Image: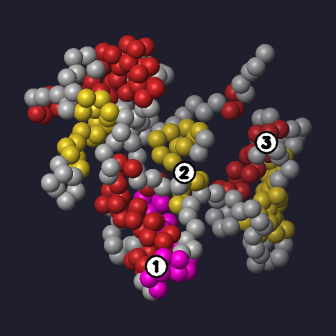
Amino acid sequence: GLTIASEKVQKTCPWKYLGWRIQMQTISAQPLQISTEIKTLYDAQKLLGTINWVRPLLGISNADLGPLFALLRGEPDLLSPRHLNKDAQIALQKVADAISQRQSALQPHALIFQWDLEKLDPLLIIEWVFLPNNMPKTISMQDELMAMLIIKARQRLTSLAGKDFDRIYLPLTMFYLNWLLQMSENLQIALADYPGQISIHLPKHKLLSSSFNLLPKPKRSETPLRAMTIFTDGSGKTHKSVIVWKDSETGTWQSGIAVVERSPQIVELAAVVRVFKKFNTPFNLITDSAYV
C-alpha cells in the first residue's frame, strides 16, 4: 500500500508547503518579485498607477518610488520607449518585499465599509474582519468560512452601529450564489433574517480591484555562475556525506566528511545542507541526487 516516508513528515514549526512558510499563527509567502516588462510609457503608467494606490497600505514612501516615477518623464507619447534601470529595479523590489511581508493570520477575510459618493475617495473603511486563529475544525469548507465571516461581521456592525448591513458583497458568481443559498445550511444560517441586499459585484475602487502579477523569486540560477563550484555525494553503505570544493585563495582542494546514519537520500541531502550552511556567497552546486 501507499506509505509516507517518516523523514518527509514535518513535525515542527515552521512548515514549508508549495512555496509558503506556515507558522503557528501566520502564513507568509516566500520572497517575491513583481513580474513586469516595461517597454513603453503606457506600461510604466499602468504599473505606477497600481503601485500608487496600494502604496499607503505597504508603508512605502514617495522617495522610495522616486526611480519609478522618473519613468514618467520625457517623451509624452504613450508608445515612447521606457526601460527599468538598476535604481528602478531596486525600487520595484522594495514593493515586492513589502507585499511579501504583509501577513494575515487566516484567509479569507472581510471588510466593513461605507460608500460615500460625496467624498473624494468614496471608500470609507470602518474595520477589517478576520477568522479566528484557532478554528473549531481542522478542515472547513469555503461556505463555512464565508458564513463565519458574515456572522462575525453582522455581530460587529450591530455592536458598532446598532443596525445590519444595507448590502453584503460575496466573492461568488450568480450560479454559485443561487446554489449555496439553496444547499448550504451554513450560509442560510449566516443570512437568517438579513433585511438588506446581497451582491456579487464589488464597488469600483482601486483598493478592491488592484492586483499584481506575482511569481516566486528563485534563488537558483538557470545558468552557471562565475563562482566557486562545489561537489557533493553520499553513500548509503558507509553513511558518509561528502562535500568537495576548490579554495579560490590557495587553489587547493578542500573536503568535508560527515557520517549520517540515515537513508542514502538523506545522506546526500545532508551534504547539500552543509554546503548552504558553510558558504554564504553564490556558488555552483554539482550533485547527482535526484532526491535533492
Residue type indicated by callout 2: Gln
The label number, if any, that marks residue 143 in the structure image: none
Q: Residue furthest right?
A: 237
Is residue 187 rendered to the left or right of residue 276?
Answer: left
Q: How much space separates mark 3 and mark 1, taking CA atoms? A: 45 Å
Q: CA distance from mark 2 to mark 3?
A: 22 Å
In the picture of the structure, the residue carrying the numbered disc 2 is 30
Give above or below for 256 relative to 17. Answer: below
Residue 291's disc number: 3
Q: Earlier in the sequence, mark 1 or mark 2?
A: 2
Residue drawn 77% across the image and 66% down it: 223
90 relative to 193, above or below: below
Q: In the rendered view of the protein, which quadrant contains the N terminus?
A: top right
Please, is residue 262 above or below residue 40 in the view? above
User: Residue 217: horizontal and vertical position, in percent?
Assistant: 59, 57
- Residue that appears at 12% across and 28% down: 163
Magenta region: 75-98
Q: Residues within 10 Å of mark 1 (few under 14, many from 20)?
A: many
Q: Mark 3 or 1, which is nearer the eye?
A: 1
Q: Is residue 78 one of those drawn in magenta?
A: yes
Q: Is residue 158 left or right of residue 36?
A: left
Indicate the position of residue 277 as horizontal and vertical percent values: 65, 56
Q: List x then y, in percent, for residue 155.
A: 20, 26
| SS for dot 2 | loop
Circle 1 residue = 71
The residues tagged by marks 1 and 2 sit, at their Cα atoms, a distance apart of 28 Å
Label 3 is placed on what type of residue? Tyr
Element at badge 1?
helix
Q: Residue at x 58, y 40 (%)?
A: 16
Dividing the picture into quadrants, the one containing residue 218 is: bottom right
Horizontal placement of 53 versus 289: left or right? left
